Image (tube, helix red, strand yellow):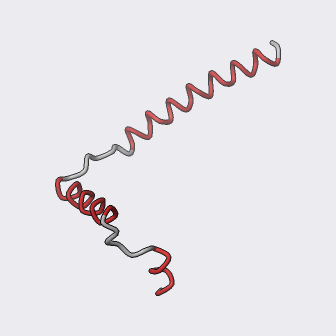
Amino acid sequence: MSKDELLTKMYSEIKIIKKEIEEIKNVLIPEDKPTGEELEEIKLGIAEIKGKKYRDWKDIKKEI
């Protein structure tokens, strides 16, 4: 087997392994849909950012 053939085979196998790992992660750590309350908090946060009604993280860190 040539070097190029070996690399191609390894790449194909790595792609399969990555796909299998992703499937395992999805089974072990399912993603929950956000609740209505969480969606409302997200909307409020976006509105605060758009309205610049927030404190910069750098300023908060200085106070700590």
Furthest residue toward right: 2
Residue 47 lies in what quarter of the image?
bottom left
Left or right of 41, for residue 55 = right
Furthest residue toward left: 36
x, y (%) of residue 10? 69, 24
Left or right of 7, for residue 34 = left
Left or right of 30, for residue 39 = left
How many marks are shown on the rendered structure? 0
Task: Indicate whether 8 appears above or below 50.
Answer: above
Image point (75%, 15%), residue name: 5
Furthest residue toward bottom: 63
Question: In which quadrant of the rendered image does the N terminus lie?
Answer: top right
Task: Indicate whether 7 appears above or below 57.
Answer: above
Image point (56%, 25%), residue name: 16
x, y (%) of residue 63? 47, 87
Image point (70%, 19%), residue name: 8
Residue 9 lies in what quarter of the image?
top right
Task: Indicate whether 8 appears above or below 62.
Answer: above
Left or right of 1, for residue 34 = left
Image point (56%, 30%), residue name: 17
Task: Indicate whether 27 appears above or below 55.
Answer: above
x, y (%) of residue 46? 30, 59
x, y (%) of residue 14? 62, 28
Of residues 9 and 34, the one nearer the viewer is: 34
Of residues 57 and 13, the one nearer the viewer is: 57
Furthest residue toward front: 51
